[in-house]
Image: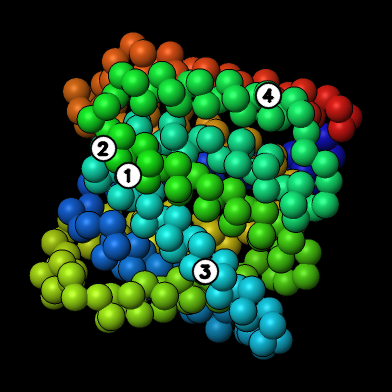
Amino acid sequence: MPKTNLKNYLHLHFLVFIWGFTAILGALISLDAIPLVWYRMFFAVLMVMGYLIFKKKPLKIPLKTLLKFLFGGIVIAVHWIAFFSSIKVSNVSIALITLSTGALFTSLIEPIFFKRKLNLLESFFGIIVMSGLYIIFSVEGEYVLGIVYALIASFLSALFSVLNGIYIKQYKAEVISFYQLLFGVLFISAYILVSSEFTIEDFYISTSDIIYLFVLSSICTAYAFVVSVKIMKYLTPYTVMLTLNLEPIYGIILAVIIFGEKEKMSPSFYLGASIILITIIVNGIIKSKKKS
């Protein structure tokens, strides 16, 4: 592996650990999913904007490109809302292990955007992954809604990864991140304004929430978001999504340590989770050998 790729791959692993901790913060913050994501994106876009002003980075881009970033911003906003909704109605373990199906969704989406044939082996592995999900569905019935939310988040994460894998070839990571975060927070703001289900109290944040939101917005969002987009310039979307499957391992270990009994699941859950993770890892190994 070239030195540059190795550096970016190791950096990606560090980001995956940060994203695993993101789920912990989502469980610790008392806000519901939509206010939580609004604060996350609002603070993050301010931080990225401050960085761009400090570095005197130009932000002028064509209108057609702005529309692309608008779509990307909406995708990542809804992804985060679905992800944190999953945590709120179930727990960290359910949300993270279901989110690991992103590599499967990426294998289905990539052929559309990169104009290649669907890989039959990936389709076979996809069936195995679905069997692992079925096991989890069958034994964790009380968490069905959480699994559904996480599946939506997983699909949108895969879509977002593929889209930014295309965008990064033409634009700077910081500029992509700024506009996508900005459009994401504007999209949520518009939804809040036209909806009648929110009150001022829904956006009240406690002292502990402020601390958690700062960490979530700065390290887990502004920093991780910009660097992850930049890494996509050197690594394929599939490699990024494959590595992201370590996120549930980091996150579940942290969750069990921090939350204890709430995060301890049935043996069948861990069986289904193992089937999903092992299948996706094996798929990645086979794919890597074919490319070498």
Q: Amino acid at mark 2?
A: Ser
The reply to whether the C-beta atoms of the residues labelled 3 and 1 are less than 8 Å apart is: no
Q: Which residue is mark 3?
A: 73
| Distance from Cα at disc 3 to Cα at disc 1 | 20 Å
> Element at badge 1?
helix
Give the number of the mark in front: 1 or 4: 4
The reply to whether the C-beta atoms of the residues labelled 2 and 1 are less than 8 Å apart is: yes
| Distance from Cα at disc 4 to Cα at disc 3 | 32 Å
- Which residue is drawn at the image coordinates 43% and 31% (left, top)? 97
The reply to whether the C-beta atoms of the residues labelled 4 and 3 are less than 8 Å apart is: no
Residue 150 lies, with reference to residue 255, above or below; the image says below
35 relative position to 95: left or right: left
Q: Residues within 10 Å of mark 2 (few under 14, many from 20)?
A: many
Residue 176 pos. (x, y %): 62, 71
Residue 135 pos. (x, y %): 41, 19
> Element at badge 2?
loop
The mark found on residue 124 in the picture is 4
Give the number of the mark in front: 4 or 3: 4
Q: Which residue is mark 2?
A: 90
| Distance from Cα at disc 2 to Cα at disc 1 | 6 Å
- The N terminus: image quadrant: top right
Label 2 vs 3, first from the N-terminus: 3
